[in-house]
Amino acid sequence: MKLDILAIGAHPDDVELSCAGVLLKEQSLGKKTGVLDLTRGELGSRGSAVIRDQEAANAAKILKLSARENLAFKDGFFTNDEEHQLEIIKIIRKYKPEIVLCNAIIDRHPDHAKGSELASVSCFLSGLKRIETFLDGDKQEHWRPKHVYHYIQWLDLEPDFVVDISGFIDGKMAAVQAYGTQFYNPDDKGPKTPINSKNFLDSIKYRSANFGRIIGTEHAEGFISERHPAVNSLFDLI
């Protein structure tokens, strides 16, 4: 199956928190979307890897994804090396996405920056035909996504461009809250973490509202590009 967009996250919930609105919008426009989680988030202070697997599956249904896979890299300790690159290359060549969305280039959690670089390098290497990979015994064709964009996470990074997601914020928040063990619940008695406060949950919505305010819409999500964004006409800009 070919995907139009593949979103890659170091942890389950990275994608939901950062670019779920875009995935929902593009899916509504007929695009095929998918998510690749690099780890199972097993080092998280709350829940467990098994619970996170189910939460990710629930979120996938809300996002109406065509595919979701998890490479089960070691949370906190995966590296940008040949072994990990080849596993991502196999997924890129399997789904042949036109666009890859991946982690923030720098962030509070070191896995995010590592995941960002790992995904970016893998996208480039995937286009080299002399790198051979096999899936289910069959040799894969080389494939390089046309675009790699980095979503914004904990830090307030300045985006290169923003995408209007007005009308999709409720779906985004539902996908986020599918991770019930991770985020704010007033009745929860579990350990406190930086991401399970009410302030953090509210910030997901007000950040998108602020990006929307800046471009004159209700909600938007921001991205950083590895090359200059381009449009065919000035009238393509909103």
Image (cartoon, helix red, strand yellow):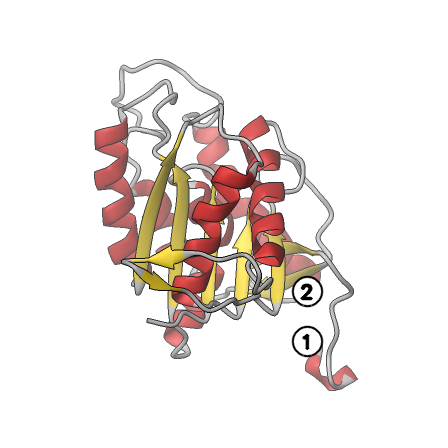
Q: Residue at x 74, y 68 (%)?
A: 229
Q: Which residue occupies the foreground of this view, 160 or 2? A: 2
Position of residue 166 relative to residue 195, above or below, is below
Please, what is the three-letter code of the amino acid marked with disc 2? Ile
In what quadrant of the picture does the N terminus appear?
bottom left
Side (left or right) of 89 relative to 28: right
Residue 165 lies, in percent from the top left, at 51, 64
- Measured in 3D between alpha carbons, the distance from the residue under mark 1 to the one under mark 2, in whole angstroms, is 7 Å
Position of residue 30 relative to residue 49, above or below, is below
Question: Which quarter of the picture shows residue 193?
Answer: top left
Position of residue 73 relative to residue 48, above or below, is below
Residue 18 lies, in percent from the top left, at 51, 48
Q: Residue at x 38, y 60 (%)?
A: 34
Side (left or right) of 200 relative to 212: left
In what quadrant of the picture does the C terminus appear?
bottom right
Q: Residue at x 29, y 49 (%)?
A: 59
Q: Label 2 crowding class (10 Å Cα cut-off): few <14, some 14-19, many 20+?
A: some
Q: Residue at x 58, y 36 (%)?
A: 80
Asked if one can make out residue 169 in the rendered structure from this viewpoint, the answer is no
Question: Which quarter of the picture shows residue 38?
Answer: top left
Residue 216 lies, in percent from the top left, at 66, 66
Residue 57 lies, in percent from the top left, at 24, 47
User: What is the tally of numbered marks visible in this picture?
Assistant: 2
Kind of element beneath mark 1: loop
The reply to whether callout 1 and callout 2 are in contact (CB within 8 Å) is yes
Q: Which residue occupies the foreground of this view, 199 or 231? A: 231
Q: Which mark is residue 215?
A: 2
Please, what is the three-letter code of the amino acid marked with disc 1? Ile
Q: Which residue occupies the foreground of this view, 226 or 193? A: 226
Circle 1 residue = 238
Kind of element beneath mark 2: helix
Q: Earlier in the sequence, mark 1 or mark 2?
A: 2
